[in-house]
Image: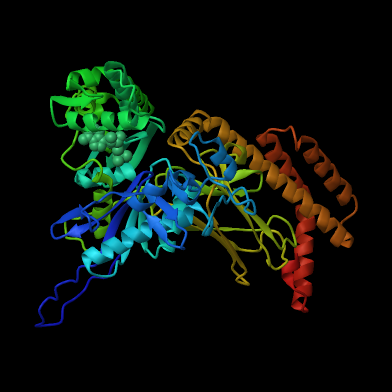
Amino acid sequence: MALLQIQEPGGKPARPKHRLAVGIDLGTTNSLVSARCGLKVESLPDETGECLLPSIVHYADGGQVYVGKRAKAMALVDPANTIVSAKRMLGKSLSELRTLDHYMPYEFDATRDDTAPSIMTRAGSKDPISVSAEILKVLKARAEETLNGRLEGAVITVPAYFNDAQRQQTKDAAEEAGLNVLRLLNEPTAAAVAYGLDTADQGNIVVFDLGGGTFDVSVLSLTRGVFEVLATGGDTNLGGDDFDRLFAEWLKHQAGADGLSEGEIMQCANEIKHRLSEEEAVEFTLASQAMTVTREQFAALTSEPLERAMRICRRSLRDAKLTNEEIDNIVLVGGSTRMPAVRVAVAEFFGREPLTSIDPDKVVAVGAGIQADVLIGNKSENDFLLLDVTPLSLGIETMGELVEKIIPRNTTIPVSRAQEFTTFKDGQTAMALHVMQGERESVADCRSLARFTLRGIPAMVAGAAKIRVTFQVDADGLLSVSAEETLTGAKAEIQVKPSYGLEADTIKSMLQESQEHAREDMELRSLREAKVDAIQLIDAIAGAVVADPELLEEGEEARINEAVAKLIAVLDEGSSAQLTKLTQSLNEVSGDFAARRMDAHIGRALQGERIDGV
Ligand code: AMP
């Protein structure tokens, strides 16, 4: 928390300097930057008055890099050196990219690992991070020029379904562009923030995002400033283009437009579609024929993609376990939500009007801009700090293939938690750490996030070393785990970037499974713990018998061996109660021997031997 400031006696309060921070919507097709300009947060236009920057990068002959409209013009002429939709490639391996159904006319760099795809261009090998960085650099320069100063921070939006790898690469791109990333913000959350929905105490919000080629729907729930993504759904092949295509087919049929190219008809369809968002009917000429089309006709011709979107919407609500009536607000995002038919369908479905007062192309960037302004510290008393939570618990694997949770699910981030662990075996000098995510007790039922090893632990008896493991989740949801041996300071750490996506559906099913298996998991934990205790005692006694055979009394070794054999017999099949009982018996039978060893070692310690070897 920031320290409270106290004014000098008699001095005038200094007017706080307005610090420059922007919100950036790094989109698949277009990107935008927005910032506070006076009282409002607005999207910043380029010198031609255009806010949307096509997310396209062209590596030109003379070494120049073109971004935006100029690059777009090169997409058909020189596709190999013009990168479109870099966002779709972020955080993906080459094999994953090959399974995408989007055409990618690129030559991938064969010297790169499958996990780090990169495109061969005339300017060298370019990975999706550096392509995205080029787009961000242009937006940064635009903002610094418009705002007349250096940017101190940026909030960048990402789709709600982005996994950690995709988020990390977005962050890397921003850093490469010289931006200080204040936070990555989910796109639907940003849209809700733009409408000020976060200031309510609670509510359920649907963000309906229909762009040119993709459809995304997110169901959010807000409780005391914390947004939670309850469900996401969508279709990467559903958008305005489908409306254009269906309408173009009709036009072709009506006008018998033989003399026109496919491109010309598509363009005509797109223009009429846009005009029909403003006018009830449009008159136009195609292939020298005068024609009229009404809004109603257009809606009837293009009903299929809209019905598909509404079905996805219904499914997402079901996933979120909410009914239409439980939704308090619907936010429209994406150019295609300007179509009156879309607004009507949404209003009918939810039984209330969607929020439309902010330009649907800019609403995400505006929300990000508002958030950036708050995070950089330009906030007034009634402003807020947007909170986020960990969707699943984070923990570490312990003996018995069990998971010890360190940060429970639903903890507000950023957060840092530490816990001490110790060694299992005498003389153990290294510790394998396995970072886990999930609610279940067994390693096999949770997600593995990362593994690393702490070395350099001084050799001690089992249980004597102290290893402090710290979990830290930053404001962007990225996890750092460190392990430190407290005596020597030996340390190892890892940043977790899991390569597999954690979809909202996965979270939901993981939570559901943990509830269904709660009892069974508890039993499994107590069984495995009992087994770990048994093995540890058996190992310790075996070591002690070898180390101090002279301290055993007549017949004692046989009695101990008998108890050990009984315990070993139930080790694999026994119940937790049996294991606990027989471990206890072994403890009793060997108790005197252990006490004699302790006395002997203390005696020797007084004469100079180290006691930690016992
Ligand atoms: P976006 O990807 O959000 O930029 O959305 C672009 C899509 O929105 C394209 O399919 C456009 O044709 C469509 N679009 C933009 N403005 C309008 C409008 N006024 N009426 C209908 N569709 C529009």
Q: Going 78% across and 79% down the picture, which residue do you hit?
A: 607
Query: Could you tell me which quadrant the N terminus lies in?
Result: bottom left
Would residue 217 appear left or right of 352 to someone viewing this image? right
Give residue 143's position: percent from left, percent from top: 27, 62
Would residue 559 appear left or right of 94 to someone viewing this image? right
In this view of the protein, which residue sits in the foreground, 111 or 115? 111
In this view of the protein, which residue sits in the foreground, 567 or 314? 314
In this view of the protein, which residue sits in the foreground, 556 or 394? 394
The image quadrant that residue 239 belongs to is top left
Q: Is residue 474 visible?
A: no
Would residue 472 appear left or right of 179 to someone viewing this image? right
The image quadrant that residue 361 belongs to is top left
Q: Is residue 44 above or below residue 255?
A: below
The image quadrant that residue 208 belongs to is top left
Q: Going 30% across and 18% down the picture, which residue do you hit?
A: 256
Q: Is residue 384 above or below residue 320?
A: below
Give residue 107's position: percent from left, percent from top: 57, 47
Would residue 335 appear left or right of 506 to someone viewing this image? left
Give residue 362's position: percent from left, percent from top: 24, 46
Q: Is residue 166 above or below residue 610?
A: above
